[in-house]
Amino acid sequence: MMTKTTLNDGTPVYCLRKPEAKMLDYHVEGYLQNGISIEDNAVVFDVGANVGVFGLRAMQKAKNVSAYCFEPIPDIFSVLKKNSEEYGNGRIHVFQLGISDVTAEATFTYFPNTPALSTLHPEEWEKDPKAFSRAVKGTMKNPPDGMKWMKLIPPIFSGVIAHYLVKGKKKVECKLVPLSSIIEQENINKIDLLKIDCEGAEWSVLKGIKEDDWPKIKSLVIEVHDIDHRLEKVKHLLTEKGFSRLHCESEIGLEDTGMFNIFALR
């Protein structure tokens, strides 16, 4: 059910879960560091946009920013669309699409209790069933501003909370397209920042970028699930494509989850 909340600085936003909107905002701040910035007239691509917090924040960071936001899950997309209409000033462009290396239909797993973890690759959590519980425990230890009450919950309850969050999952059919097809369709000649946070599908997103389009991309920030040496594969690919400045780190509290953020600049 769509609702409305305010982020810690008073910014209004539509969302599905109020605590999750604040958590998404916390992640946004984590992305804009290690040399990643948004300048005037920037073009930002947000793959795995969720309800659009990143796009909204990007517009606040500089003048005349354009954001292209991609979210495949219908319930989440409806909120993204609402935020773009209410707060986008015509500069947030939204697409009900998943980004991959092929054009296809795919089955996503949607978690109504924690929409941000909805994924095309639920098997990545299933390979290590305790990883999600560890992620919850890490977040409880280091919660964002406005959610410090989470520290009061005994860590022993992380498993119970994790079980609740994934309860009631649903299967939904979504369309996938390669990023380069959007670049061509929208006549994009530059992407100042490409942010990818798509719950395990990041490698497919990168493989869907044509050789001619790589020089258009100035910087990236990518959440990588390090399964089957994916972290090294992504770093190698980015180096190959001319990104000489790479920084890799885990968010505080998520060191035991195998999830990393890569910051890449030319």
Image (cartoon, grey):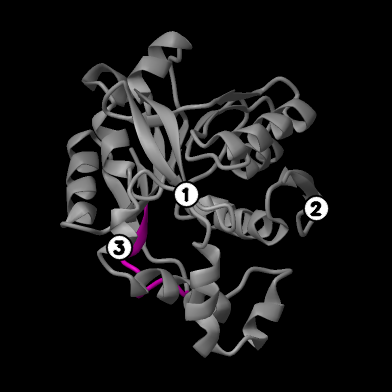
At x 63%, y 28%, the residue is 65
Does 216 appear above or below 47?
above
Mark 3 falls on what kind of element? Answer: helix
Judging by the rendered image, the residue that carries numbered circle 2 is 6
Residue 215 falls left or right of residue 186? left
Mark 2 falls on what kind of element? Answer: strand
| Viewer-proximal residue among 64 and 12 | 12
Task: Examine the image and state in which quarter residue 218 appears.
Answer: top left
Mark 1 falls on what kind of element? Answer: loop
Q: Which mark is residue 70?
A: none
Judging by the rendered image, the residue that carries numbered circle 3 is 126
Judging by the rendered image, the residue that carries numbered circle 1 is 118
Give, as a three-letter code, the residue at label 3: Glu
C-beta proximity under 8 Å, tags 1 and 3: no
Q: Which residues are magenta?
A: 253-262
Q: Which circle's residue, 3 or 2, is located before the other in the chain?
A: 2
At x 30%, y 51%, the residue is 246
Q: Which circle's residue, 1 or 2, is located before the other in the chain?
A: 2
Does 95 appear above or below 245?
above
Distance CA(mark 1)–CA(mark 2)? 23 Å
Q: Is 4 one of the magenta-colored residues?
A: no
Give, as a three-letter code, the residue at label 1: Ser
Give, as a three-letter code, the residue at label 2: Thr
At x 35%, y 60%, the residue is 260
Classified by dominant secondary structure, the portion drawn in magenta counts as loop
